[in-house]
Image: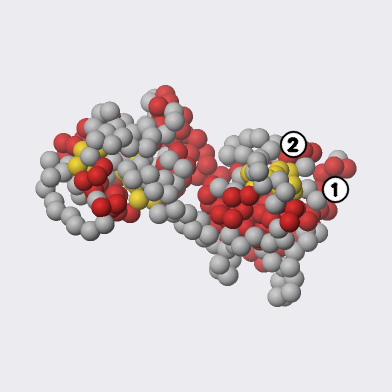
């Protein structure tokens, strides 16, 4: 076994973690599992682990297996630097502030000061090798979650399958050559992949009102909505997806507003509303929705046409 891998295996087995409550605190090992997954899935390409909803989402997939206290990803994101291979990089203008902080109280506070974290370059390069990722994963699980090995392995296998489906969804959005329902027959996994992809493409932001909120637990105020309802179309293609907050998801499904071929919103005249003008649906009229940067990932014009003809109350 190469000396450099042995070095990091030892580091992973001897993380500096809180042991005051009996069992070792799981925050650091779970964050490392999340980072390994993100590198494997191509979501971390450069040596930059950014404090975003995507890394929170990856962290929560493991944290939720433990059924313990509320997740606090900001703790390991900051304190993992004490293990020597995790490095924090301040945002421009915050370089003097970062060394003065001994503790963060939220992920949003970290995001305001920290641009990204990086790994030792040697470790980052090692994690590009599938066999090394597997060895490091297994080391983390055996060291910190020995009593839940089967549970963690099942979660890892399922996550790898869902990631493969995400890749298929993204490829199909560009080529339009695949029949997703025939290739991916597991509806639940396909639905999870669809939701993850849509949420990330819109950066967890409502396409209608551009409202974005993510809690410390990684919960988002938006849903991955189907334009042509899934129970009718069984279509999980990216072109049939749009990110909408709870209010606008409900309103869209009930035809209170729709979207034209130029991605401008059309608001129905068949309802009344009153209250805070900020939340008024009528203020959306003729406004362009938030769109993914790449055209292949934008809502399908044919799906929008279906919605206008079959759901919208003109």
- Residue at image position (25%, 28%) is 261
Tell me the number on the disc at residue 179: none
Using the image, determine if residue 92 lies above or below residue 53.
Answer: above
Using the image, determine if residue 203 lies above or below residue 19.
Answer: above
Q: For mark 1, what is the residue?
A: 7
Seen from the viewer's position, the closer of residues 151 and 218 is 218
In what quadrant of the picture does the N terminus appear? top right
Neighbourhood count class around disc 2 (C-alpha, 10 Å): few under 14, some 14–19, many 20 upward: few
Circle 2 SS class:
helix
Query: Is label 1 in contact with label 2 (beta carbons under 8 Å)?
Result: no
> Can see residue 24?
yes
Q: Which residue is farthest bottom?
A: 21
> Can see residue 190?
no
Decide if residue 13 is on the left or right side of residue 76: right
Q: Find residue 228 and report its image quarter.
A: top left
Decide if residue 228 is on the left or right side of residue 140: left
- Residue at image position (79%, 38%) is 122
Seen from the viewer's position, the closer of residues 88 and 276 is 276
Q: Which residue is farthest right?
A: 3
In what quadrant of the picture does the C terminus appear? top left
**Residue 168, x across and y down, in percent:** 47, 34
**Residue 205, x across and y down, in percent:** 41, 45
Q: Find residue 145 and report its image quarter.
A: bottom right
Q: For mark 2, what is the residue?
A: 125
- Residue at image position (50%, 44%) is 162
- Residue at image position (81%, 59%) is 14
Considering only order in the chain, which callout, 2 or 1, is on the residue closer to the N terminus? 1
Decide if residue 113 is on the left or right side of residue 4: left
Q: Find residue 69 and report its image quarter.
A: bottom right
**Residue 34, x across and y down, in percent:** 62, 50
Circle 1 SS class:
helix
């Amino acid at each position: 076994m190469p000396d450099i891998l042995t070095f990091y295996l030892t580091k992973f087995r001897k993380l500096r973690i809180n042991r005051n409550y009996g069992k070792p605190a799981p925050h650091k090992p779970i964050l490392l599992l999340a980072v390994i997954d993100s590198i494997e899935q191509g979501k971390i390409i450069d040596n930059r682990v950014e404090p975003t909803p995507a890394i929170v989402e990856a962290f929560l997939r493991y944290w939720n297996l433990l059924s313990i206290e509320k997740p606090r990803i900001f703790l390991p994101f900051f304190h993992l630097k004490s293990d020597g291979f995790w490095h924090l990089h301040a945002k421009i203008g915050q370089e003097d502030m970062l060394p003065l902080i001994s503790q963060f109280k939220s992920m949003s506070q970290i995001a305001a000061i920290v641009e990204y974290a990086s790994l030792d370059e040697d470790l980052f390069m090692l994690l590009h090798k599938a066999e090394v990722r597997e060895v490091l994963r297994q080391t983390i699980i055996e060291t910190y979650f020995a009593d839940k090995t089967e549970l963690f392995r099942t979660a890892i296998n399922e996550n790898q399958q869902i990631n493969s489906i995400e890749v298929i969804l993204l490829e199909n959005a560009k080529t339009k050559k695949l029949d997703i329902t025939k290739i991916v027959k597991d509806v639940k996994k396909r639905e999870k992949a669809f939701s993850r992809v849509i949420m990330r493409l819109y950066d967890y932001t409502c396409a209608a009102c551009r409202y974005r909120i993510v809690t410390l637990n990684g919960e988002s105020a938006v849903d991955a909505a189907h334009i042509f309802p899934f129970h009718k179309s069984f279509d999980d293609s990216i072109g049939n997806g749009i990110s909408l907050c709870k209010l606008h998801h409900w309103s869209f499904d009930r035809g209170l507003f729709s979207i034209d071929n130029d991605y401008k919103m059309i608001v129905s005249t068949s309802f009344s509303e009153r209250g805070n003008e900020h939340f008024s649906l009528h203020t959306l009229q003729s406004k362009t929705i938030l769109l993914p940067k790449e055209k292949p990932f934008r809502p399908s014009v044919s799906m929008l046409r279906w919605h206008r003809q079959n759901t919208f109350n003109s």
